[in-house]
Amino acid sequence: MATKKGLTGKQKAALLLISLGPDVSAEIYKHLTEDEIEKLTLEISTIKNVSSDKKDEIMEEFYNLVMAQDYISQGGIGYAKMILEKALGPEQANLIINRLTSSLQVKPFDFARKADPNQILNFIQNEHPQTIALILSYLESNQAAQILSNLPEEMQADVARRIALMDSTSPDVIYKVEQILEQKLSATVTTDYTQTGGIEAVVDVLNGVDRATERTILEELAYKDPELAEEIKKRMFVFEDIVTLDNRAIQLVIRDCDNEDLILALKVASEEVKEVIFKNMSTRMRETFQEELEVMGPVRLRDVEEAQGRIVGVIRRLEESGEIIIARGGGDDIIV
């Protein structure tokens, strides 16, 4: 499947289209962006003669990539690699898999994202919290939330904290952890350094757990790492999420917020946010706010963000006191 050195991906694509002929190429063009069409057309225009050998090389490479992608969709990277090694040998199989996984940005634990969370829980619940955190950071947030909710309470906050503080992970470590699950769930391996975890990852997970689990984890985090706990709380409900509150809750927020903060916060708010807030004001208050916004000059973005943060703080306090409910994951948010 070796092709001549020096050919770029764009040149190979152009040669492939030439080899496929005008009718097929025209159909492919329908699925490309204008920029891609322009670049490919320019590349095709610079190619004068294509030898049959070169056509065969490009067609073979394309065929093998398509087949490899099909194998991956059937049984994962491990399955694809096994089939390709039998057909083409280890060296060519590695070249194809590396090229394809790079372009697809296939993540570690791809197999686990298709597995049942309870099954994964059975295999990892006795592992070290760092190992569990690594695995959860690669799963879909709803999967990770279900697993985290079912871990022992004394472990939940520790695992959440480790996810939040996780940065890049060595491919050797990822490989070893994947091997833990390989015998039970079938494995997939990547050798790339991959960004995992972080604040956003743990926020996604906590947004999917039930309220009791969320409260337990945040309370424990507040004790062990107050700054991290506060940062997570800030990101779990942002100002724009106010549109998810019911009318009564928004009215209580308006009641408890400083008017200056509300005006500043609305300065750069979306029309959807303005609409739900104005809808829950009295006619006089709404008209006053609209007049203030019309005459308000430029303001610093930092001031706006600080005002929005104070409003989010009010919303959190109202939720903690039980006056409003913020709908998140978990069955205890069902209102009857």
Image: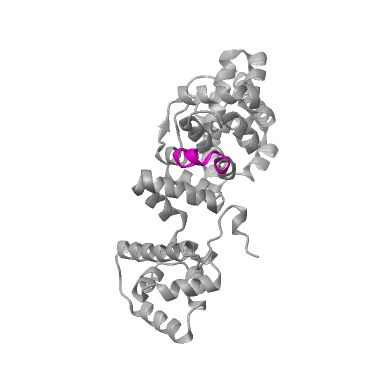
Residue in the image at 68% along x and 30% along y: 70
The part of the image, by quadrant, that contains residue 64 is top right
Residue in the image at 49% along x and 26% along y: 174
The part of the image, by quadrant, that contains residue 53 is top right
User: Main SS of the magenta segment?
Assistant: helix
Q: Which residues are magenta?
A: 148-159
- The quarter of the rendered structure image containing the C terminus is bottom right
Residue 48 appears in the rendering: no
Query: x, y (%) of residue 327?
Result: 56, 60
Q: Is residue 156 one of those drawn in magenta?
A: yes
- The quarter of the rendered structure image containing the N terminus is top right
Q: Nearer the viewer, residue 272 or 113?
A: 113
Q: Is residue 128 above or below residue 286?
A: above
Query: x, y (%) of residue 45?
Result: 54, 36
Residue 48 horizontal side relative to residue 222, left or right: right
Residue in the image at 56% along x and 41% along y: 144
Q: Nearer the viewer, residue 169 or 120?
A: 120
Query: x, y (%) of residue 15?
Result: 58, 30
Residue 222 horizontal side relative to residue 78, left or right: left
Query: x, y (%) of residue 276?
Result: 51, 72
